[in-house]
Image (spheres, rainbow, N blue to C red):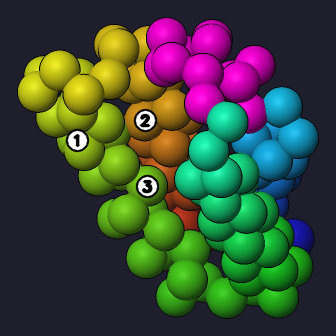
Amino acid sequence: MSKSAFSLFVFGIYAAVVGIVLMAAPNFMLGIFGIPHTNEVWIRIVGVLALVLAFYYTQAARKGITGFFVLTVYTRSTFIIFLTAFVLFGFASPAIILFGVMDLLGAVWTGLSLRSEKK
């Protein structure tokens, strides 16, 4: 497995853990990020979406689909912008930006790995 594939695989595992926690114990994670607890199904749906993304990341990594790796660098690196906007508009607490930081760090890792593999 290449370095870039490994970075995406690790990020996929992270996304799977987040997805499982959001499905099984959503209010635990909401509390950590200062988001009001809910009994509505939307947060569990977000967990399912995280699991779907995790599947894409891990399987693309296993199959070495480098075109997908590149696309995730763009999307994961912009996620922090949206979360920061949510905080600035008062929709979320600043702690939510940690999710964006995780995505950004993962994107940088993948991007640097891709760059080193081109040489």
For the magenta stretch, what is the residue range? 26-38
Q: Nearer the viewer, residue 75 or 88?
A: 88
Secondary structure under badge 1? Answer: helix
Secondary structure under badge 3? Answer: helix
Image position, residue 89 (x, y; %): 11, 27
Q: Magenta span has 18?
A: no
- The relative height of residue 6 versus residue 27 in the rendered view (above or below) is below
Measured Cα–Cα span from mark 1 to mark 2: 8 Å
Image position, residue 30 (x, y; %): 61, 23
Residue 76: which disc?
3
Q: Tell me, yes or no, whether the two marked residues, 1 and 2, touch with CB atoms within 8 Å.
A: yes
Q: Residue at x 67, y 88 (%)?
A: 65
Q: Nearer the viewer, residue 113 or 64?
A: 64
- The relative height of residue 77 versus residue 119 in the rendered view (above or below) is above
Q: Residue at x 51, y 18 (%)?
A: 36
Name which residue type carries label 1: Ile
Residue 68: which disc?
none
Which sits earlier in the primary sequence, circle 1 or circle 2?
A: 1
Is residue 4 in sight in this rendering? no
Which sits earlier in the primary sequence, circle 3 or circle 1?
A: 3
118 sits to left or right of 2:
left
Image position, residue 33 (x, y; %): 53, 16
Q: Nearer the viewer, residue 50 or 58?
A: 50
Name which residue type carries label 3: Arg
Q: Which residue is mark 2?
A: 100
103 sits to left or right of 29:
left
Measured Cα–Cα span from mark 2 to mark 3: 8 Å
Query: In the rendered image, which quarter contains the N terminus?
Result: bottom right
Which sits earlier in the primary sequence, circle 2 or circle 3?
A: 3
Residue 81: which disc?
1
